[in-house]
Amino acid sequence: MSMLIKTIFIGICLLHSLTSLAENDYQKLGKKADHLSQQAQWNLTILPNGDNLPKGSGTAAQGAKIFALKCAGCHGPEGIGASAEPLVGEVGSLASDYPEKTVNSYWPNATTVFDYIRRAMPINKPFSLTNDEIYALCAYIFNKDDIFLNNVELNEETLPKVTMPNHSGFVAIYPSQN
Amino acid sequence: MTDSATINRRQFLKKASLGGVLAGAVSLPVWASQTTAEFPDTLPEWMRKPGDAFKNYGQPSAYEQRVIRWISANPDAPGNGVSWTPLHDLQGTITPNGLHYERHHNGVPQIDPAQHILLIDGLVKQALSFDINSLLRYPMVSRTCFIECGGNSNSGWKKNPIQSKAGYAHGLVSNAEWTGVPVKLLLEEAGIKSSAKWVIAEGADAAALNISIPLEKLLDDAILALYQNGERLRPENGYPLRLVLPGWEGILNVKWLRQLRLVEQPAMTRDETSQYTELQADGSARQFTFVMDVKSLITSPSLGMALPDNPGIYQVSGLAWSGRGKITRVEISADGGQTWVDAQLHNPVLDRAFTRFSLPWHWQGEYAVLQSRATDETGAIQPSRSALIEQRGNHSFFHYNAIISWEITESGDINHVYAD
């Protein structure tokens, strides 16, 4: 091999090794996952407009029975708190010297109550309640402070329409004052 | 300058005098004048027999077993609660992995990484899933930063000062080197639709914790962390995968991350409405208060310690941090905030990370109130307690960053007080 050819060969090798070590290069390893996005277990978050709410229904009267059985141990028989936080009462207390942040006095969106019960309650057995049971429990909690009527059925259509007492009580700090 | 200011400034030693204190400590070793037969009596036993065998994973000394996280959990749900980092027992700036603070909403899941995926979907051009082995092949970045629970120091809002050790009142904050994949890389791989403004992050714990995060932050400096101080994440810190959002409140740094869903509006989840919002005196509540503001804490001397020598020289030492950038200044007062002296900042001073500060203090046995006051590079100064309460009211509960005061009694005991 002549000197010239050798030099060219080494040059090509160098060039190749440099390009194969280029910065900011990586293999894109994400797998197409549209099928997962359709499945219920990847659609747990319920939006304030009701998106992702499952079909189902329940009333406050039904909820009272479920509450006594599955919730009262921590939340107290009337939902006013035991080892867990109080859920009901104290509506209108937020500007007082002794404010109480209950679901009914503080939470701005009814949809959040369904979302949270389903993913986290009961704390010893999350994801164990049926959709009907969760609607009934929401109706029971809301009914305690007359946010929702006793005999009316709460379901995927009516839940997003429930207006919580503190719906307008929040001031977004991000992004304006962040 | 007032008389008290002059006296106070004299109490703090200048750095230059430190060398003199350390010199002259050399003496002859004991063995130099003794015979072999006397060794068993004069050498400690650990020099006279072989030490322990190797361990596959090291543990702290048996003599340091009191250095622990302090746990406060719900008796009906032992996995729902917090544990505080013992900041008063630590030095430097890196929190050991076994002592990083914890906030769990329903226990620590033991996740098999082979069965865990991250799904990125919603307002993207192509929904994508990533398994852990794939994520380990992406280019990684490392970032040393603090993570602080929004509820850290919340006893400060109470009427009377809590008598807990420094870390057990203010240690829902820790500082670690996090290593992982920039979230931006993965979001861009999925392709972000222009209507996407927020991202709902969800964890794979037994609370399936979900929270809305501005897309802007995830595209800025967010890390999908796989490693913590060089080793894979501890289960209690999100194994196998967590979000790290430098400077933003702990709850957003979602552990055991399973999904990022891009959406237009925040989901108003439980942990961005009923919790981690700050009730004000007029009954309205601040929401989406993401950045943790400038703060500092004297870790030594602090409650639970005592000053043994009177008079004596004590190294006042502590930590300062800000979610808005680097710490530029920490001042120390020994007279409850009437006069202040600049502390020395120890390198490295990193963006949104713990910065160690110190200053030698001559204590002459007088009553004193030790305080530290931090300033960050945006010019924000840690407020007095009264100024913070004036601004936020008494029921804010979250985001307490006021100056913390340690009272030194004439007998050298230390108490937590509200001094301003």
Image: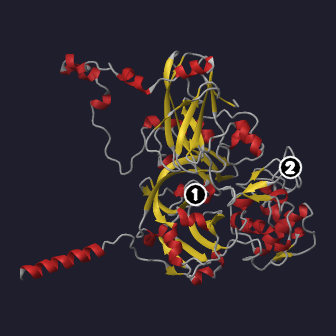
Question: Mark 2 to mark 1: distance in Å?
Answer: 37 Å
Check the picture and name the quadrant holding the N terminus of chain B. top right
Check the picture and name the quadrant holding the C terminus of chain B. top right
Nearest the eye: A34 or B37 = A34
The residue located at (63%, 57%) in the rendering is B251
Examine the image and state in which quarter residue B258 appears. Answer: bottom right
Query: Do we see residue B409 in this rendering?
Result: no
Q: Chain of mark 1?
A: B
SS for tag 2?
A: loop
Nearest the eye: A37 or A14 = A14
Query: Do we see residue B254 in this rendering?
Result: yes
SS for tag 1?
A: loop
Circle 1 residue:
B108
Q: Amino acid at mark 2?
A: Ala
Q: Amino acid at mark 1?
A: Val
Which residue is outermost to the front? B1
Residue A80 image position (x, y, % from top left): 84, 53
Residue B306 image position (x, y, % from top left): 56, 24
Query: In the drawing, does residue B43 fall left or right of residue B289?
Result: left
Circle 2 residue:
A95
